[in-house]
Amino acid sequence: MLDDIVVLEVGTRVSTAYAGRLLRDAGAVVARLEAPGSGDPIRTEDPAYAEYLHAGKASVTDLLGAGHGLADRIDVVLHDDRADVAGMLAQLRSRRRSRRRHLVVVSVSPYGLDGPHAATPANDFTMQAETGLSRVHDTGGRPSVAAGVPLAELTGGAAAAMAAVVALLADDAAESSITADVSLFEAAVSLQQYPWLQSRIEHHDPYPLPQAPVPGIEEASDGWVCIVSVTPDQWKDLARIAQVPGLADPRFDSLGGRIVHAAEVTPLIREFTRRHTVEELVEMGAAHRVPIVPVGTPGSVASLAPFAARGSFARSVSGDFVAPRSPFTVDGAVADVEALAAPGLDDGRDWSAGPARRRSASPDADPQRPLTGLKVVEIGTFQAGPLVTMNLASLGAEVVKIETVNRPDLIRFNGVAMTVDRAWERGGPFLGVNLGKKDVVADLADPRGLAVVRDLVAEADVVLENFGPRVLESRGLDAEGIRALNPHAVIVRMPAWGLDGPWRDRPGFTYTVNAASGMADLTGYPDGDALLSGTVVDPFAATVGSFATIAAIRRRRVTGRGASVVLPLCDVAIQLTAEAVVHESATGRVVRRTGNDRPGLCPQGAYRTADGAEVAVSVEDDAQWARLAALPWVGEWAGDPRFATTAGRAAATEELDALLSRACGALVSTEVIDDLRGIGVPASRFEVGDDLVLHPQLVARHRVVEIDHPVVGPQPYLAGPAVFTGGPSMLPTAPAPLFGQHSDEILRRLGRTDEEIARMRADGLLADSPFNAPFDRTAAPR
């Protein structure tokens, strides 16, 4: 999709490397600028992971002096805050001006390049704490624990890749070069499920903490499974196959009720699960369409059925390890597994031979809204797919969301009791992922409704769906059916378990792919249960999916060719656990959850302060420790020579944690955090996330926007993690739609008469509430 684009990657962050990997997977030529000799430090510190991140990329060590023509071929510079690129960028821009060519620059840093926290030290651990991601874990009263994967870095990498293709689209219409400033903190914020909305919307249930679904991770006779019953039917089916009388208690009928009464429900569920093996439970779930999956580990995930049967993992060219393939396919093809180039291998390469960048802008194109005029049809539900189309709407596309009277998007019912008037219009999780769309009711099971959907598909530029494969395929709307209606459409499919393999028709959710991928197994204390990390897989998948979709849109604009992009949720989830899978397969050593401990970061943990808060502290090297030890409130114990080195501190982790806990406990959280940040040590408070819209960094970077909604009134929403200069703001501009709000408008556009629309409404095919639920029609819109 990006075969005409050359990317220069400069930096040492995982986020930068992962962005480069995604761009390479989409066809771009990615050249890494490395130090002469040994190259990037990760090559010697972690050679297997280096091969995973950088395989298939070119390697150069002298940008301007060697690599014939490379400096003149670069379309995108991707760099992070650990690389000094000012001089290089000045030279590249000077060369561009003389040739009247633009240069897209994408930067990645913890908090972004401006704002009051731009220079604040941070890492993945402290950013997970500050954004509220750590607080979703049920630690049973023990200190808060972060997810066992680098959520901020990997999501930031996906956001940087997305920012690059957005900037390329906008750059085609811009008069000057476009820059994108990606914040890892804001990327981590994007994984949250809108706690600021749930705490502000009238009648909304409180934001649930911890966010452990019930059922969730459950014990079998020979291992662990993840069971999901987020819908009423799934809970009824589970209770029926469990045959445990206590589960019939009406207090347990809703997910919220089960979470409140988890101490009673979980033993009853495990009374059932402990009687069966993992395999038996998985097959029972499949027979009754209750999502039940094994809890994968870094050592077992590649052999689980949905991955092994579909070739989701591949052996490296070196033969040293297995790792996930690209998370998406394009027109049935997946990016090849390639070798890791030696440092400077491409210094003598002739770069003039590749295809020149193609441009696509029409005369009236707007770099602020580069997708204006694009028509998108969304047949989606919950978060992953709808978040992709919401990103397209923020770039100017018209997005038409399709729902059915008796099959609405069930996330509408998340968070507000049905006894509340128009509860389906008030749920924070629905409002947060559907900004700027139009909503049409069309019943796929009725010929008239199916005809409406087919007409919408025929006029669309992009069609996205994330239902189970058979939902659309049974109605002739698989990729071939859509292509027959619209040969040049970009088709994006996001099934839970892929379009083939033994699990393709099984229901799947963010929780089940989280568990199967090994992420839950990597999160929590070594002597405790595996922990699910809320719903983070969905928004992460949406960021990766937005990148792939926008890259396909760009290809369509410059070549006229549509695309069929398939992005299974399970294949995105294993991107998050790739590092652990690579390490275990390369070394043979079992990789398991370690609480908050991470190699090379010591001490790192959650410490209670005098005001009752928890602070996250992460010491990254010996120099940081020396500065921390010199703080007056730390104490003489910090001068113990055993603690002078990372290895010495790691050998005395428990003792060190106890001593640092005592020291932090004598101060309030702001004192601890301010002092540590002042000496360059990453620190933050473990937050809930309900006040993120007031965070001074987000406010200063204009990431917060207030939008009025006819039912819930004005509410604050957040833009994505990239700030563009000369390009789009990607700020939402309109609220989430009411159920069926635009049905009449769209049906008339498609040629339906008022009489036909009236008949459809009389026959129950159209409605302004799901399930034709009654509501107060006399209440004036807010």
Image (tube, rainbow, N blue to C red):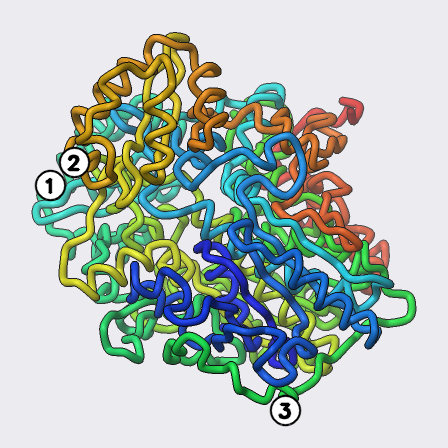
How many other residues sit within 10 Å of disc 1, few (<14), some (14-19) or many (≥20)?
A: some
Give how far apart the Cα atoms at labels 1 and 3 are: 63 Å
What is the C-alpha distance between the residues marked 1 and 2? 6 Å
Would you name the residue on which mark 1 appears?
274
Q: Position of residue 170 (x, y in %)?
A: 77, 62
Residue 573 in sight: yes
Q: Secondary structure at mark 1?
A: loop
Q: Residue furthest right?
A: 363
Please tell me whether mark 3 or mark 2 is closer to you in this view: 3
Q: Which residue is pictured at 60% across the width and 59% down the height?
A: 162
Q: Quadrant of the N terminus?
A: bottom right
Residue type indicated by callout 1: Arg
Q: Which residue is mark 3?
A: 353
The label number, if any, that marks residue 620 in the structure image: none
Residue 453: give x, y in percent of width and height: 67, 64
Residue 146 spot, x, y in % from top left = 35, 36
Q: Earlier in the sequence, mark 3 or mark 2?
A: 2
Q: Nearer the viewer, residue 75 or 372?
A: 75
Q: Secondary structure at mark 2?
A: helix
How many residues crowd mark 2 within 10 Å: few (<14), some (14–19), many (20+)? some
Q: Measuring 37% from the left and 80% from the top, which residue is drawn there?
A: 339
Q: For the C terminus, which image quadrant?
A: top right
Residue beneath disc 2: 270
User: Where in the figure is residue 31, as x and y percent of width and height?
Assistant: 53, 73
Label 3, secondary structure: give it. helix
Residue 269 appears left or right of 469: left
Describe residue 96's horizontal placement relative to residue 771 as left or right: right
**Along the horizontal axis of the image, is 771 left or right of 173?**
left
State the image quarter where residue 713 is shown.
top right
The three-letter code of the residue at mark 3 reads: Ala
